[in-house]
């Protein structure tokens, strides 16, 4: 009986795949994959047809409705259909739209979780997102929105959370910092930008919210998680970051 698997590939490093994810990739008949899925991961697909349906910022990408239809159609002609998503399917991965399409078509499916980028970034930084007396809550947010949809309430959430992980934030870091400072978050709040977490080309940049407004940041070549909060202060201080920016209302 045909089945579709929505599989998280984690932050990128192939050895961070779950065992279940690896087994499904190896046995799949057809695989629809994001643009950021590593070639080493795709190499596990010994017999599957590979279909690239990845979305890249600022580039022409497959429409989500096309992907939904392709999954349904593939399930009618193949026994094992795998949809590979970067990170975890349920975290900013449009999984719900694909789930809704599969349910409407009566297609059996399963979701296989993966390591989400914020946790990979924290592990790389060797900084816990929670810390007794410093951070009792964590917010995973994105400032991005799809065309035609209303703005989300990311600013309110990010302003009040002890620790914040902002996804897809590489190109918007200065604007995000300005918005947070304008909403009352101190300009001296430590930040860490982690690009391509878990991969050999990973880059880490430490600064402050105020620093993001004045410093020249490296142009991102991969996905960036912007980590914000006091839990990053010691790690940033070890990188000789000065916390001299005055807080603004």
Image (cartoon, rainbow, N blue to C red):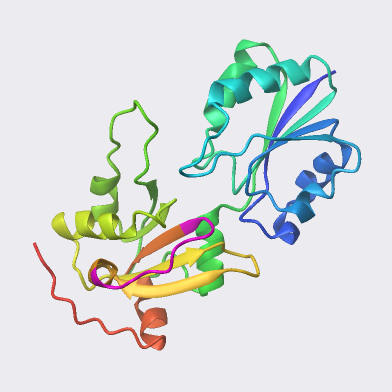
Q: Residue furthest top?
A: 105
Q: Position of residue 205 (x, y in %)?
A: 43, 73
Looking at the image, is 120 positioned above or below residue 72? Answer: below
Residue 133 seen by the camera? no
Q: The C terminus lies in which quarter of the figure?
A: bottom left
Q: Position of residue 90 (x, y in %)?
A: 55, 39
Q: The N terminus lies in which quarter of the figure?
A: top right
In magenta segment, residue 221: yes
In magenta segment, residue 146: no
Looking at the image, is 132 positioned above or below residue 101? Answer: below
Rendered image quadrant of residue 166:
bottom left
What is the chief secondary structure element of the magenta stretch? loop
The residue closer to the viewer here, 132 or 130, is 130
The residue closer to the viewer here, 135 or 12, is 12
Q: Which residues are magenta?
A: 214-224
Q: Is residue 8 left or right of residue 196?
A: right
Q: Residue at x 91, y 37 (%)?
A: 47
Q: Residue at x 84, y 49 (%)?
A: 44
Q: Is residue 105 left or right of residue 58?
A: right
Residue 73 seen by the camera? yes
Q: Position of residue 53 (x, y in %)?
A: 64, 34
Q: How many marks?
A: 0
Q: Position of residue 191 (x, y in %)?
A: 35, 69
The residue closer to the viewer here, 96 or 149, is 149
Q: Residue furthest left?
A: 249
The residue closer to the viewer here, 23 or 70, is 70
């Amino acid at each position: 009986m045909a089945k579709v698997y929505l599989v998280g590939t984690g932050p990128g490093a192939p050895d961070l795949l779950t065992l279940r994810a690896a087994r499904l990739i190896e046995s799949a008949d057809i695989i629809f994959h994001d643009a950021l899925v590593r070639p080493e991961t795709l190499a596990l697909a010994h017999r599957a047809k590979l279909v690239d349906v990845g979305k890249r910022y600022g580039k022409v990408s497959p429409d989500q409705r096309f992907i939904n239809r392709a999954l349904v159609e593939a399930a009618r002609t193949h026994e094992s259909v795998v949809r590979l998503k970067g990170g975890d399917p349920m975290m900013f991965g449009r999984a719900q739209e694909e789930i809704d399409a599969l349910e409407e078509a009566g297609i059996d499916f399963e979701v296989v979780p993966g390591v989400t980028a914020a946790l990979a970034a924290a592990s790389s930084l060797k900084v816990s997102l929670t810390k007794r007396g410093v951070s009792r809550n964590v917010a995973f947010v994105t400032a991005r929105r799809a065309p035609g949809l209303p703005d989300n309430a990311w600013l309110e959430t990010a302003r009040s959370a002890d620790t914040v992980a902002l996804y897809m934030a590489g190109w918007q870091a200065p604007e995000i910092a300005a918005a947070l400072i304008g909403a009352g978050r101190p300009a001296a709040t430590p930040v860490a930008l982690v690009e391509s977490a878990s991969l050999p080309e990973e880059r880490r940049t430490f600064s402050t919210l105020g620093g993001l407004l004045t410093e020249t940041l490296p142009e991102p070549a991969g996905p960036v998680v912007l980590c914000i909060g006091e839990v990053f202060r010691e790690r940033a201080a070890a990188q000789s970051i000065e916390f001299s920016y005055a807080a603004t209302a």
